Amino acid sequence: MIDQQEWQEQDSDDFIELGEYFVPERQVQMDVVTSVIAEPREPAEILDLCCGQGRLSGALLKAFPAATVVGLDLSAAMLDTARRDLADHGARFRTEQFDLAERGWRTRAEAPAAVVSSLAVHHLDADGKRALYRDVHTMLRPGGALVIVDLVQPVGARGVELARRMWDESVREQGIAGTGGLKPYERFHELEWSCYQYADELDKPSPVLDQLNWLTEAGFTEVDLYWMKAGHAVFGGVKAGE
């Protein structure tokens, strides 16, 4: 289980302020997620695991006007921000506080049409990821999708260095474009945000091929890698229809 003390509210505040610069091509990632989910033909729930400040939840609400999105997160600061920023959607967005590694939340009164997660699953170890994929497959309605945006582990030293360099360059470029200066880039290094440069026990990324295999083992079909850059990947699969 993720110890609540490992992720501090200051980490949430830092990400709320700087996530736009720290995440490579964040809008592209969200566009990919919404593009690979089949639009529900009837009212349905979509779960956003570790929803953070609600950026992906907002994209889902816009893309799927018949859907309700449930944003789940450990951080009270993140949930408060998401509720405030998405208040215009009314009852179509609601939140739950949870721990990703615990299993109680994985039994739902209503089978979701999709489950998504952005930049969170890498906090689980390999066994935790495999259990999550199995449980989400069981939870989903037939035809439902699991789509994950996450950090993945390159298998060799050259891959790690490439991911480190590309992420570093992305933060520098996005920071300059957004602020006209290097402050976001400097904070990226002050906070030791890159797991490819600064070791952190909270980060446990797994190779993308392993995760595609675990999704297949869990019963997902159409398992695929949809997008990848600077060690960040979007991948997932679909629960077969009845």
Image (spheres, helix red, strand yellow):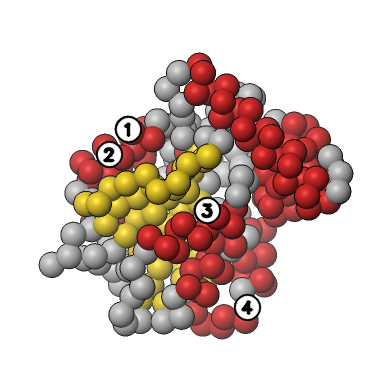
Along the viewing direction, whichever of 142 and 11 lies nearer the viewer:
142
Q: Nearer the viewer, mark 3 or mark 1?
A: 3
Q: Residues within 10 Å of mark 2 (few under 14, many from 20)?
A: many
Residue 183: give x, y in percent of width and height: 84, 41
Q: Check whether the beta carbons of the residues at disc 3 and disc 1 lie within 8 A of each other.
A: no
Which mark is on residue 210? 1
SS for tag 2? helix
Q: Is residue 97 visible?
A: no
Which mark is on residue 175? none
Q: Check whether the beta carbons of the residues at disc 1 and disc 2 lie within 8 A of each other.
A: yes
Q: CA distance from mark 3 to mark 4?
A: 23 Å
Q: Nearer the viewer, mark 3 or mark 4?
A: 3
Horizontal side of residue 13 vs 217, given as left or right: right
In the rendered image, the vertical position of residue 175 relative to residue 242, given as above or below? above
Q: CA distance from mark 2 to mark 4?
A: 36 Å
Quarter of the rendering occupied by the C terminus: bottom left
Residue 198: give x, y in percent of width and height: 64, 25
Q: Which residue is mark 4?
A: 87
Which mark is on residue 29? 3
Q: Amino acid at mark 4?
A: Ala
SS for tag 1? helix
* Quarter of the rendering containing residue 145: bottom left
